[in-house]
Amino acid sequence: MVHWSAEEKQLIASVWSKVNVAECGAEALARLLIVYPWTQRVFASFGNLSSPTAIIGNPKVRAHGKKVLTSFGEAVKNLDNIKVTYAKLPELHCEKLHVDPENFRLLGDILIIVLASHFARDFTPACQFAWQKLVGVVAHALARKYH
Amino acid sequence: MVLSANDKSNVKSIFSKISSHAEEYGAETLERMFTTYPQTKTYFPHFDLHHGSAQVKAHGKKVAAALIEAANHIDDIAGALSKLSDLHAQKLRVDPVNFKLLGQCFMVVVAIHHPSALTPEIHASLDKFLCAVGNVLTSKYR
């Protein structure tokens, strides 16, 4: 089980309380597809992903980004129980969606950049540490049942 | 992975905005890297790594200068960083994985100080550039 210090929990919660999940999620997913274009491979059904403008404006990308970050929020609310919180998601990503777990790591790094751009100096080094730890834990929880 | 004409122009554009703060951003990048990825401190046992350390500031200035040099010679990064590449291969031997960690922290610093300049397109080009720099610095490792 992952150990979270009181400070880490507080830093995570304090950032999360100010996050606009729909906007942040949409931006993070769009940036993932733009910065690492090979990640588009699992989104063939999403329609027009032909340019950064198309990706940013794509309603399916926006909706899915919101969905992903909303789910991420479940981990934030259950830091001591992330494995249990994500009981079904690993199988879904492995068996149905066929997503390479490396994508979770990439999305986590992108999310950090998006948070940094929104929170500026409030996204202190200590904050970055806690959040980088969190995205790593989430990525690991999603990948743990791959077979 | 090749830098397109567009990538090169994007990188020059963002660097024109950040080069006057290079030293400051270099130091902040290192501080964030040491805090976020404590394993990176293993390469600096001889440094004072506390916040505000003069050694970190000086080293940050060097790192930033190298990135600027690469950006200014973006058509030949390997040539521009050849001596640094030798240094990393023969003396420093920083594990290749760490260049990505430094790159992530540099990107965070740019995002913090220039959020509106770091559009998705610029982000993509800058990410490619930082990868290219890391590749050059590790190119002579074996």
Image (cartoon, helix red, strand yellow):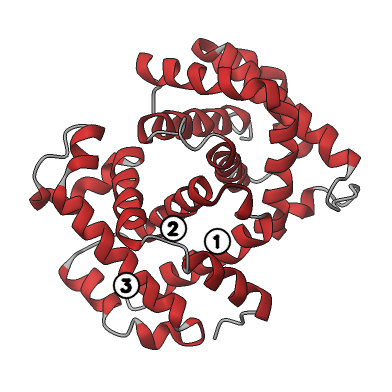
Q: Which residue is mark 1?
A: A132
Q: Amino acid at mark 2?
A: Gly
Instruction: Residue at 42%, 67% (x, y): give it.
Output: A139
Q: Amino acid at mark 3?
A: Ser
Q: Position of residue A69 (x, y in %)?
A: 34, 64
Callout 3: residue from which chain? Answer: A
Q: Is residue B83 above or below residue A109?
A: above
Which corner quadrant holds the C terminus of chain B? top right
Q: Mark 3 to mark 2: distance in Å?
A: 13 Å
Q: Are marks 3 and 1 in contact (CB under 8 Å)?
A: no
Q: Which residue is mark 2?
A: A108
Residue A84 visible in the displayed image = yes
Q: Answer yes or no: do the residues labelled 2 and 1 have beta carbons within 8 Å?
A: yes
From this viewpoint, is residue A143 visible?
no
Q: Looking at the picture, how far across and down is residue A82, in whole percent? A: 43, 82
Q: Secondary structure at mark 3?
A: helix
Q: Which residue is rendered at x = 55% and y = 69% of the image? A: A14
Secondary structure of residue under mark 2:
helix
The residue identified by callout 3 is: A71
Which residue is nearer to you in this view: A125 or A104?
A: A125
Q: CA distance from mark 2 to mark 1?
A: 8 Å
- Which residue lies at the image location 72% right of the left edge and 53% below the top edge? B34
Q: Are marks 3 and 1 on the same chain?
A: yes
Please check whether the numbered discs 3 and 2 fall on a single chain.
Answer: yes
Q: Is residue A41 left or right of residue A70?
A: left
The quarter holding residue B71 reads: top right
